[in-house]
Amino acid sequence: MRVAPSPTGDPHVGTAYQALFNYAFAQRHGGQFVLRIEDTDQARSTRTSETKILESLSWLGIPWHEGPDKEGPYGPYRQSERLDIYRIHVDQLVESGAAYRDFSTKEDLEAQRQRQAETKDFSMTKGEYRELDAKASAARAEGGDPHTIRLRVPLEGECVMTDLLRGEIRREWYLVDDQILMKSDGFPTYHLANVVDDHLMKISHVIRGEEWINSLPKHLLLYQAFGWDSPQFCHLPLLRNNDANKTKLSKRRNPTSIDYYRAAGFLPEALVNFLALMGTSQADGEEKLSLDGFVANFNLNDISLGGPVFDTDKLRWLNARYLREDLDDDALCDRLFSWALDRERVKAILPLARPRLETLGDWGFLTAHLFADAVPLEASELVLKGAETQELIGVFQFAIWRLEALERFNAESIQTALRGLADQLELKMRDFTRPFYVAMSGRAASTPLFETMEIVGPDLTRSRLRAAIEALGGVSGKATKKLEKRYAGMQ
RNA sequence: GUCCCCAUCGUCUAGCCAGGUCUAGGACACCAGCCUUUCAAGCUGGCGACACGGGUUCGAAUCCCGUUGGGGAUACCA
């Protein structure tokens, strides 16, 4: 009955998936669904990202009972505001000997990992200072020596855990590392914060992604060390990419941002419906179902464990059904207006259209690409003067990475980023931008590039550039690695 | 490498826990036909899977073991 996204990057469909199932379970059993922001990674967490997560879930229509924007009995719901709590609890663990200080530096650990890689010694990290005398340790800490705090994991024996879907899972303790609980910056790691918060927030069921199964022993050990009863755990399968290997869903290969689906014109109810289909099915065979309908028949035990491929064919079909069956003309008009046909947006497009408009009738063709999900592409139009196709693919890929790094996605910042890229590649701006016009609009002559990108937005811009790469034959994993290397050298 | 998880049509899944009713059901996609001024939609039909090998059993998609395959974890990220 909890979902705890970390505010790093775009709101991910995987987050929505976890939220949906947590919500459904809580709702079905009359519980509370708690939205907690796990922002313990100072380097990566941003408030913007947090806001976007909240917005996205609201848009999807998945409500939470307690969260950072709501009053609740167990707040605050933002981990960065609970630092004192973790401090107190981790001290308690050090006191009891369940955890210990580790004075190793990042460099020490890096070197150790290096050695392990060379000698093919893959044994788990047991901190170097594990056996340091408690007094000596306390003295060093008081002297201001920077340190982390690690969990003292047993060296032998076996951890027996229970997953609601999988039953009993066993793991030898010696295969579990001495997890860092508190970083040297005084922030807790996920593991500590999660256990402490789940207990304090009276979380009864932890429904989360399968990637956490491996750290369950640590979490169980923490509950034990605190003398707390542990909640029940259920690990959901991970959404997968539509590639040959079905790797964990990643934005490298697919649009994973909720924002993308919104911008592309999917309806929230269709997206939720589609997510609900991942791992479950309805007895009557009807696959179109509302959130309430899903909740009404929700049963945790019915979730199938194979990692489902997030393949949007069915999503499109569902979306079409909602469009046809659930929205009358007025409602559809409203959706269209609120999606992209609002006055504000049209006014933003005016400066691009006005100089190119001879009659009002030109409007449709001139601006079509600004009101579209994808654009029709002719590979023969995608050319970079004096360069091979492979080079152009690289250019598109670099551009995607540059644009992803942008904090603000507006014409000015886009221009700076792309100009910088063109300079580094020693390409004339005129030649460099040509294929981008095609990728963005399907034509070499179109509305101004940077403004077009701004209006289309970061998610659709990225997906169009990716589509252009695909139209050129795509890029293999190996080639991507090469590009990554080259890109790193360009920074 | 090691550990953990998983394994039914191309995709999402039903069936598995309590073996027979499974010549394995539904949906998406694809193909064909019908309908139709086009295209969609709709309707009808088609294609298409129990990863492999052992075992238990009168009988295995279902239970057990192994193999293979895939995923995840192995961070001062979550």
Image (spheres, coloured by chain):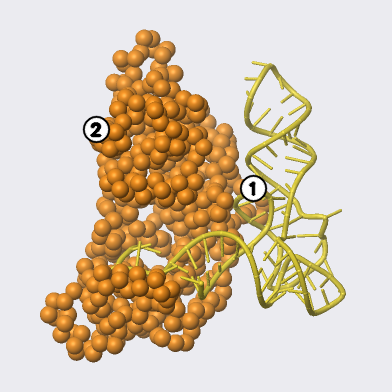
* Chain to which mark 2 belongs: A
Above or below — where is A87 with respect to A341? below
Answer with the quarter of the image where residue A4 lies. bottom left
Above or below — where is A292 with respect to A471? below
Q: Secondary structure at mark 1?
A: loop
Instruction: Determine which of the numbered discs, if any, sits on residue A412 in the image.
Output: 2
Q: Colour of chain A?
A: orange
Near-viewer residue (A142 or A199) = A142
Q: Rate crowding at label 2 as few (under 14), some (14 to 19) or many (20 or more) other CA atoms within 10 Å.
A: few
In the rendered view, does A77 fall on the left or right side of A257?
A: left
Residue at x 39% of width, y 20% of height:
A445
Residue A392 can be seen in this image: yes
- Distance CA(mark 1)–CA(mark 2): 48 Å
Mark 1 in CB contact with mark 2 (< 8 angstroms): no
Which one of the lettered chains is coloured yellow? B
Q: Check disc 1 and report the residue beneath it.
A: A286
Q: Position of residue A414 (x, y in %)?
A: 28, 35
Q: Position of residue A209 (x, y in %)?
A: 47, 62
In the rendered view, does A73 fall on the left or right side of A27?
A: left
Of badges 1 and 2, the one in the foreground is: 2
Residue at x 50% of width, y 58% of height:
A238
Near-viewer residue (A344 or A420) = A420
Instruction: Determine which of the numbered discs, if any, sits on residue A121 in the image.
Output: none
